[in-house]
Amino acid sequence: MARIDFYHLQRSRLEEVLPRLLTRVLQAGERALVVAGSEERVEDLVQALWNDRDGWLPHGSRRDGYAEEQPVWLTEDPQDNANGAGYLFLCDGSDSTLVEGMERVFDLFNGLDEGSVAQARERWRQRREEGHALRYWQQSGDGRWVEKASANAGA
């Protein structure tokens, strides 16, 4: 079972949080798959990674090709693990059956949109029933991530 971390974005936008999380994954020598809600959204995130002020992250999308060579692969297809990633980032309410084969999953959702929050709660419930180890993170007033809840596998 995968460890799944839910990130409740309230103070930062996805385009600010995603590069920091991806940097940690790459520093650990791992590969990442980022699933966004649409092809247009994929391109928005590609641009965010190109323009990240903290540094450039090697990445690609279907437009770039060579998926197997990309440490970070961005797609709107929830089944497209073309780079063989072990870390999955679900954005914009995306979901994927690839969760089962991942080492770790990051479910990043817009905490300022009640519909997104409700969908994230449903994904939490579903993943708990599936037996995954869950963590729920929320930003504090100073922007730090604080673990607010967890559910152990099988609990």
Image (tube, rainbow, N blue to C red):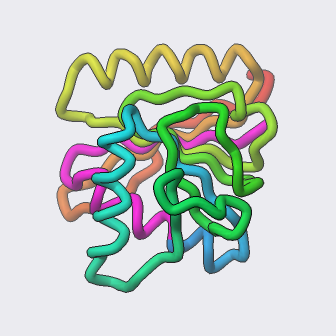
Q: Where the C terminus falls, by quadrant?
A: top right
The image shows residue 7 at horizontal and vertical percentages of: 42, 44
Residue, x 65% and y 39% (percent of image)?
A: 80
Horizontal placement of 114 versus 84: left or right? left
Q: Where the N terminus falls, by quadrant?
A: top right
Rendered position, 132 above or below 14: above
Residue, x 40% and y 67% (percent of image)?
A: 19
Residue sitting at the far bottom:
55
Residue range in magenta is: 1-22
- Of 6 and 41, nearer the camera is 41
Rendered position, 58 above or below 7: below
* Residue 119 lies in the magenta-colored region: no
Which quarter of the figure has residue 2?
Answer: top right
The image shows residue 146 at horizontal and vertical percentages of: 40, 53
- Number of numbered discs: 0
Which quarter of the figure has residue 106?
Answer: top right
Residue 144 in sight: no
Residue, x 60% and y 51% (percent of image)?
A: 33
* Residue 13 lies in the magenta-colored region: yes
- Of 91 and 131, nearer the camera is 91
Horizontal placement of 65 versus 85: left or right? left
- Of 14 and 77, nearer the camera is 77
